Amino acid sequence: MNYDKEMSAQLNQLRDDGNYRVFADLERVRGSFPRATRHDGGGTCEVTVWCSNDYLGMGQHPDVIGAMKTAIERCGAGAGGTRNISGTNHYHVELEAELADLHGKEAALIFTSGYVSNWASLGTLASRLPGCVVLSDAGNHASMIEGIRHSRAEKHVFKHNDPEDLNRKLAEIAPERPKIVAFESVYSMDGDIGPIAEFCDVAEAHGAMTYLDEVHAVGLYGPRGGGIAEREGLMHRLDVIEGTLGKAFGVMGGYIAASKTICDFVRSFASGFIFTTALPPSVAAGALASIRHLKTSNTERLAQRERVAILRRRLDEQAIPYMANESHIVPVIVGDPVKCKWITDWLLENAGIYVQPINYPTVPKGTERLRITPSPMHTDEDIDALVNALSELWSQCALARAVA
Ligand SMILES: *Cc1c(COP(=O)(O)O)cnc(C)c1O
């Protein structure tokens, strides 16, 4: 085989489909979020970032940066090993205790990313519980899908956010078999929220374990930032709550919070936990500071909510259509990959506005979109600049306006 030719052909196909990913080369500027310096062909310019998952700007928070600096001064750069072989730093232990407390669980376990936490935890639970069947929401994230696939357990996909379909599918499985129901709270791309209580009712009726991905909700919802399950008083009904330290908490890493036995089980059997270097102590220290701050401060959450409401109102005024949802995510649908890319290129080149186009396979074909994430730091002027530029583009590209 001509390897190079084969790979180039597949890449060209991706380009022709408008799905080829081009990274923006950014330098974040400490304390200036959402501003960043963009590097392009030798030159630089300032851009306003509208698509960050650092939802509350905690990656720039003085407490977080201070904690990371102190940890580097005290402990140095890396953890120096896997968790088992010299890599468990006291910051990791404190962080796990903090996360267990955040979710009202006995224990927590940290991983190098949210992706790894889903992949390793679901992969381990589903492969090690004899005869396990996994019930997976149709909208689940790639990390859960890959974890389930890796487990080689029998899998059934139920309709997105549909407890009745889950109930039907569970009813067809032999009652004595172990079952895991895996779903999310806030879905990243549509910003819709899962019916957690109903899912727990159905799972309980069939004796199934519940596994909830709260990646897009931790830090953002609930009185202490424990997520949608905290807000709705449901944390105790979930067997596993999974989250990330890389989105609203602004740092990096992933985790599960669960019973002592579940955490010990994953800790003891998950290859993706065991055979990898522990997070740098500074990263754990930063996450710890971020979680502690958001446990007691509502300021960031309230400001974000207010910014989201203002952006939606301004989009309404210009009749720019976006998907309605109950979360902080504002998906503006373009519905065509080439136009979507063209619009975001135009925004970057002409308005200093950076929104990454979201195309297939991240979202279904025909629903290509701009996924806009307002933060507490976006000003009225930022919102005006974004909405005015979009309005101009909507006219230029003859895109459909919203019907009042
Ligand atoms: C981003 C994401 C993850 C992975 O989290 P990382 O910490 O970024 O690896 C897991 N689940 C969902 C739903 C996500 O959107």
Image: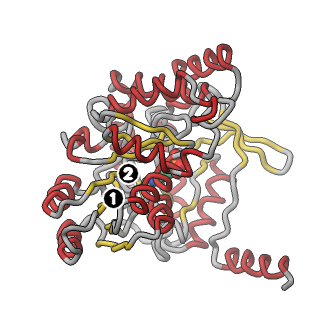
Q: Secondary structure at mark 2?
A: strand
Quarter of the picture containing the N terminus is bottom right
Quarter of the picture containing the C terminus is bottom left
Q: Which residue is the site of mark 1?
A: 183
Answer with left or right where residue 264 lies relative to residue 233: right
Residue at 52% in and 28% down: 92
Residue 371, position as x, y percentages in the image: 48, 56
Report the front residue among 269 and 167.
269
Q: CA distance from mark 2 to mark 1?
A: 6 Å
Image quarter of residue 88: top right
Q: Does ligand 1 reach within 8 Å of label 2's beta carbon?
A: yes
Q: Amino acid at mark 1?
A: Phe
| Mark 2 surroundings within 10 Å by alpha-carbon count, few (fewer than 14), some (14 through 19), many (20 or more) | many
Residue at 39% in and 61% down: 126
2 or 1: tag closer to the N-terminus: 1
Q: Which mark is residue 213?
A: 2
On screen, 143 above or below 291? Answer: below
Residue at 66% in and 18% down: 75
Q: Amino acid at mark 2?
A: Asp
Residue 256, position as x, y percentages in the image: 41, 43
Contact flag, marks 2 and 1 (Cβ < 8 Å): yes
| Mark 1 surroundings within 10 Å by alpha-carbon count, few (fewer than 14), some (14 through 19), many (20 or more) | many
